[in-house]
Amino acid sequence: MNKFFLLLGIIQLMAFQAFCQQMPIIPHPYHYEYKNGSFKIDSSWSIAAGDGVDSGTVEVFNDFMQNLYGFKFEGSGSGAAKKVGLIRDETLGEGQYRLSAKAGEVSITGSESGLLYGLFSLVQLVEEGKEGALLVPAIEIEDKPEFGYRGLMIDVVRHFRSLDQMKKMVDLMAYFKLNRLHWHLTDDQGWRLEIKKYPKLTEIAAWRDSTIVGPYSKPFVYDGKRHGGFYTQEEARELVAYAAKRHITVIPEIELPGHSSAVLAAYPEFGSFPMEDGKPLKGSIPAVDKDGKPLNNEISDAVPGYWGVHYNIYGPKEETFQFLEDVLTEVMDIFPSEYIHIGGDEVPKDHWKTSPIAQEVIEREGLADEHELQSYFITRIERFLNENGRNLIGWDEILEGGLAPNATVMSWRGEEGGIAAAKMGHDVIMTPNSHLYLDHAQGRKSTEPLHFCCYLPLEKVYHYSPRPEALSSEQQKHIMGVQANLWAEYIPSDNKLEYMIFPRLLALSEIAWLGEEQKDFERFSRQSLPVRLQELERMGVHFRIPEAIVTIDRDGEGRHKVRMESRVKGSKIFYTIDGQRADHTALPYEEPFALPHYPKGPQSTRLNYIVVTPDDRSSAMYSLELTAEGPKEIEEE
């Protein structure tokens, strides 16, 4: 009998230890096994890099350790008493690694990128114990990514970002094991890259006189401030090298044939209409839109300060192609990326209906219409890129009129474009606006800053699956990966940039790294997210403080109890149930509280609350309706 209870006790202890050892790493590892105990790390530890290990990998790891914990691991030989050993093994795939941690020794084996990811996993395993001791659990990890392309797009046109801010974003991307930065450098509202052969791109196209204030609705109100900026080629190379050290490829985007108003403000001769006295003439061929109304032929001669699709695009003439080839030649010299992104989206092709230049090309080349003219335009650019050893990638509109032979498609208007391209045998990056556009709101309109369009909470991002069921298993092999996009029309500050990206980037990280069978939002939101958000605050990241997890259950006496659980470790919750606003003077949540009782029958209670982080940053006020059946969302007032 005593043996039975002893065995039962051991089982219960093991279960308790397993419960306590919740996996904090984001993205969640492919396979892991906790061993017995934990051990302390400190400045006495060293790092032993084996043959072929890039010293930059160690430097990046030590930068994180210094910033988070105030010390670095010095280099040493393999015989050091307490060390992290790095073994390079290129038989392992991109990002793949094995980690073994036990008292006195951590061993990481992987490809070069896998070694860095293994080191980042080690950083994320660190937990502060009593009196500030840094503890690491004994553990074995085998990890690898599901997708080879794990990306984030940042728009620096609508609002410019400093080089330091871009480096900060690269660091955070790498820390969560993303490996592609899509850099949106050109659009209607500005041009952000120095091109030495065409200086007016940075003298004129990089600057707008004013920018609209508030939502995109007429009549526009302007701020009266000149806005712009650009990266010198030296600065762009600096970011490329900085990212490469962190195993991130920077993919430049040079928009064509649309979203080109800024360029044409500087070089109008590359537009679709003949020039007269240094200015383009408006369209001379009468044409109507799909509703039978005359097309607007007016051409803007300035860099616009408002958003939307602009009616000014490149002309399909030899001078324009020469200009674009010159630009792309300089771009390719800066960016070694396999891909060059050419945009290709939202081209107002009706513009070409009124253009004698465009109509002449359509007739000469035997093209059916303006859709085929766009395909002709993009195919010429693809041929040039392919001749220079690069591949073209573009938004899903490049399907219109026929897809260029070797193009890769980014599917943003839902999944349909990606599905069509994959069925045609083309590679695809999934980036649907329904799930991966980070300029959309994260919460109720009343709790969020100005944003574009729609509602995209953390949970919806997390549940996105990049492999559509409409594709066969063979066709799904063309889904190369996934990307989230941050368009910056309503993002003027760096704090807001970080607010809109985080914590949703952490969900993106798990979409890109894990197979569907491994994803678990409950585990993500309750175990790893709170730890990582606390850490992000220590890193100086201005993330959105997410809503608490609120549940209602019954205690042992049958009373309904309200439980609140913050998604930021170490934070506090202040709440009201009397209809008043919640702030620091409200009730501090310390333990589950009883649901208010109404003598005359069931009624609901409004719960207002704020979450306050360890650094005393407050969330917006969140609200729920509490009933015996559970918490309910409150309709917008």
Image (cartoon, rainbow, N blue to C red):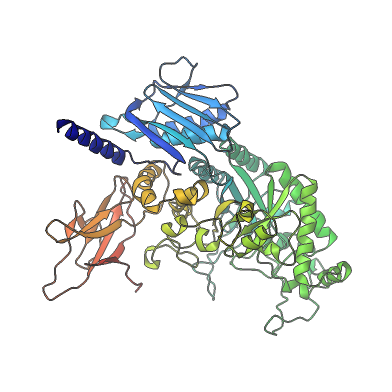
Residue drawn at (49%, 32%), measured in percent from left and top? 98
Front residue of 128/600: it is: 600
* Residue extending furthest toward the right: 364
The front one of 420 and 353 is 420
Quadrant location of residue 364? bottom right
Residue 324 visible in the displayed image: no
Eyeballing the image, is 44 above or below 474?
A: above
Relative placement, left or right, of 29 versus 555 is right
Foreground residue among 430 and 384: 430
**Image position, residue 615 (x, y; %):** 32, 45
Q: Position of residue 152 (x, y in %)?
A: 55, 51
Residue 502: x and y, percent? 44, 51
Q: Is residue 338 left or right of residue 66?
A: right
The residue most toward the bottom is 292
Name above or below for residue 445 compared with residue 585: below
Pick the front one: 606 or 559: 559
Q: Is residue 489 left or right of residue 528?
A: right
Quarter of the figure that contains the C terminus = bottom left
Q: Quadrant of the N terminus?
A: top left
Residue at the top extreme, as displayed: 79
Q: Is residue 231 above or below residue 626?
A: above
Answer whether residue 371 is visible to the viewer in this image: yes
Q: Residue at horizontal 65%, vertical 66%?
A: 346
Q: Position of residue 112 (x, y in %)?
A: 57, 32
| Position of residue 74 in the picture relative to residue 583 (left or right) | right
What is the residue that sits farthest to the front in this orientation? 1
Determine which quarter of the picture holds residue 39. Answer: top left
